[in-house]
Amino acid sequence: MNSNYIDLSPSILAKAELHIKNFRLWSEEEREASLHETLAQLDELKDIWIFGYASLVWRPEFEYLESRRGTLLGYHRSLCLWSSVNRGTPERPGLVFGLAESGVCEGTVYKLSNDNLMDKMRRLWQREMPNSSYLPMWLNCETAKGTVKALAFVMDPDDHSYVGNLSVDETIDVVLGAHGHYGPCTEYVLETATALKKAGIQDDALYHLSELIRERLQHS
């Protein structure tokens, strides 16, 4: 048990109730169908770019030929997704980032090698698409070397895993203690903030949140 574990308040549980009640992992067949549907939107299966805006910035887990800083218009990084696998459990969900509509999001774009491309994409789908919460979309990302069309995982605002209106204090309460397949939710948020700051990416809201989380950890 994580020493920083805290029970969720009734108000937070009420906000997470729909997700907890309806959470279901995709079958391999469903995940494979989603992958093929997404790839079918391309003219040809080569020179694929991936847009990373959270853990893919500091732990991509795939080989790539090139990486660039990229800017995505019309979306912003937000802790807007309940996580019952990667950074939480169905009984004690954590939070992970998604691309929410409006604003601007800076991150990293990666160009994948064409070698064993389907294997790379299947591993990516296993990590990022355990269920239907994300909408995989091909979006134009601006880089210093020109615009690239990159795959981005966008939050589905109609999905039961969408986080609506948590306050900053509620967000911290959720993050503290949540732990999933890839480790603690605190690690996920803090590592993302550190990686973005190291890359020179501005995200004042995330940096402020990370400082509050560190303060809570120090006094726990």
Image (cartoon, rainbow, N blue to C red):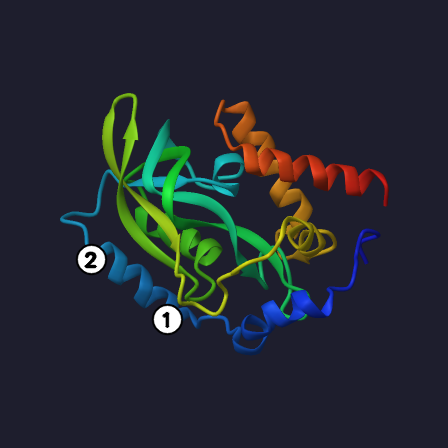
Residue at 33% x, 55% y is: 136
Question: On the image, numbered disc 1 is attached to which residue?
Answer: 30
Q: Is residue 166 above or below residue 68?
A: below
Residue at 45% x, 40% y is: 53
Relative to 142, is 211 on the left or the right? right
Q: Which kind of residue does numbered mark 1 sit on?
A: Glu
Q: Which mark is residue 40?
A: 2
Quadrant into which the N terminus falls: bottom right
Q: Is residue 65 visible?
A: yes
Residue at 81% x, 51% y is: 4
Residue at 66% x, 69% y is: 13
Q: Which kind of residue does numbered mark 2 sit on?
A: Ala
Residue farthest along the bottom direction in this orientation: 21
Mark 2 residue element: loop
Q: Which mark is residue 39?
A: none
Q: How many marks?
A: 2
Query: Residue 108, located in which quarter of the rendered image?
Result: top left
Image x and y of residue 158, in percent: 40, 67
Residue farthest along the left direction in this orientation: 43
> Depth check: 30 or 14 in front?
14
